[in-house]
Image (cartoon, rainbow, N blue to C red):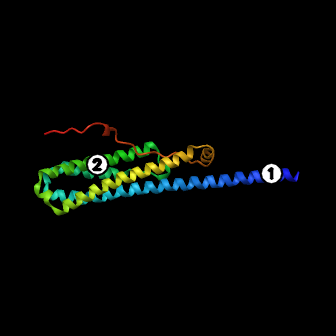
C-alpha cells in the first residue's frame, strides 16, 4: 500500500513539474512575441513621427502638390488609428495593420517622387537628412518584422507540438499571426521613360 501511494505521489509530482515548466515556457515565449510586436510598433511609430517634418519641409517648396501632401497626412492619420493588441496578434489583425502601414509607404513614395521635380528641395539639407532617416527607418521596419516572424514561429511551434499543445489549449495559448508580403509585391514595378 505504501509503495503504491509513493508511486502515485511521484507520478503526480512529475506531472505537476511538467505542467509548471511547460506553462512557464509558454508564458516566456508569448512574452517574447509581445516584446517583438512592441518593437515593430516602435519602428512604425518612428516613421509616423518623421512624416510631419518631411511634409513641412516639402510644403515650403512644393505648395501646389497639395493633393500628395494631404494623402500622406491622411494615410498617417489612418495608420495611427489602427493598433493591434499583443494578445490579439491574429493573421487578420496583422493584415489590417500592415495594410494601413502600406498606405503610408505608398503615400511617402509619391511624396519622395515629387522631390525630383524640385532641385532646390533635393538640395535642402533638412530634406536630405529626413529622407535618410526615413530610409533607415524603413530598413529597421523590415528587420523588426523579420525578427517578429521568427519569434512568432518559435512560439507557434511550441504551442502546436505535442504534449505542450495540451497545456496550450488548457491555458488558452493560441497561435500568433505573421507579417506577410504585400499582395502587390509579386508584380514587377512599371518603369516608364
Write the residue at 56% across / 46% down. Answer: 159
Left or right of 61? Residue 82 is right
Write the residue at 24% across / 39% down. Answer: 189
Q: At numbered mark 1, what does the secondary structure look like: helix, strand or loop? A: helix
Q: Residues within 10 Å of mark 2 (few under 14, many from 20)?
A: some
Say the numbered circle drawn on residue 105.
Answer: 2
Q: Is residue 187 visible?
A: yes
Q: On the image, numbered disc 1 is attached to which residue?
A: 7
Whole-percent x, y for residue 110 in the image? 21, 47
Give the CA separation, mark 1 to mark 2.
63 Å
Q: Is residue 174 visible?
A: no
Left or right of 118? Residue 10 is right
Whole-percent x, y for residue 30 in the image? 52, 53
Mark 1 or 2, nearer chain start? 1
Q: Is residue 50 above or below residue 145?
A: below
Front in this rendered view, residue 24 or 88: 24
Say the numbered circle drawn on residue 38.
Answer: none
Write the residue at 47% across / 51% down. Answer: 151
Q: Residues within 10 Å of mark 1 (few under 14, many from 20)?
A: few
Q: At numbered mark 2, what does the secondary structure look like: helix, strand or loop? A: helix
Amino acid at each position: 500500500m505504501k509503495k503504491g501511494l509513493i508511486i502515485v505521489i511521484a507520478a503526480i509530482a512529475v506531472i505537476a513539474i511538467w505542467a509548471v515548466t511547460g506553462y512557464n515556457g509558454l508564458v516566456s515565449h508569448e512574452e517574447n512575441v509581445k516584446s517583438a510586436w512592441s518593437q515593430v510598433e516602435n519602428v512604425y511609430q518612428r516613421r509616423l513621427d518623421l512624416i510631419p517634418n518631411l511634409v513641412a519641409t516639402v510644403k515650403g517648396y512644393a505648395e501646389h502638390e497639395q493633393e500628395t501632401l494631404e494623402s500622406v497626412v491622411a494615410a498617417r492619420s489612418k495608420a495611427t488609428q489602427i493598433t493591434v493588441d499583443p494578445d490579439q496578434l491574429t493573421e487578420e489583425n496583422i493584415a489590417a495593420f500592415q495594410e494601413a502601414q502600406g498606405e503610408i509607404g505608398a503615400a511617402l513614395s509619391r511624396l519622395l517622387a515629387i522631390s525630383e521635380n524640385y532641385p532646390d528641395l533635393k538640395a535642402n539639407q533638412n530634406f536630405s537628412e529626413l529622407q535618410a532617416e526615413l530610409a533607415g527607418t524603413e530598413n529597421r521596419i523590415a528587420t523588426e518584422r523579420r525578427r517578429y516572424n521568427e519569434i512568432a514561429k518559435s512560439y507557434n511551434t511550441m504551442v502546436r507540438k505535442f504534449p505542450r499543445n495540451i497545456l496550450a489549449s488548457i491555458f488558452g495559448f493560441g497561435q500568433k499571426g505573421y507579417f506577410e508580403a504585400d499582395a502587390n509585391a509579386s508584380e514587377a514595378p512599371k518603369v516608364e521613360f
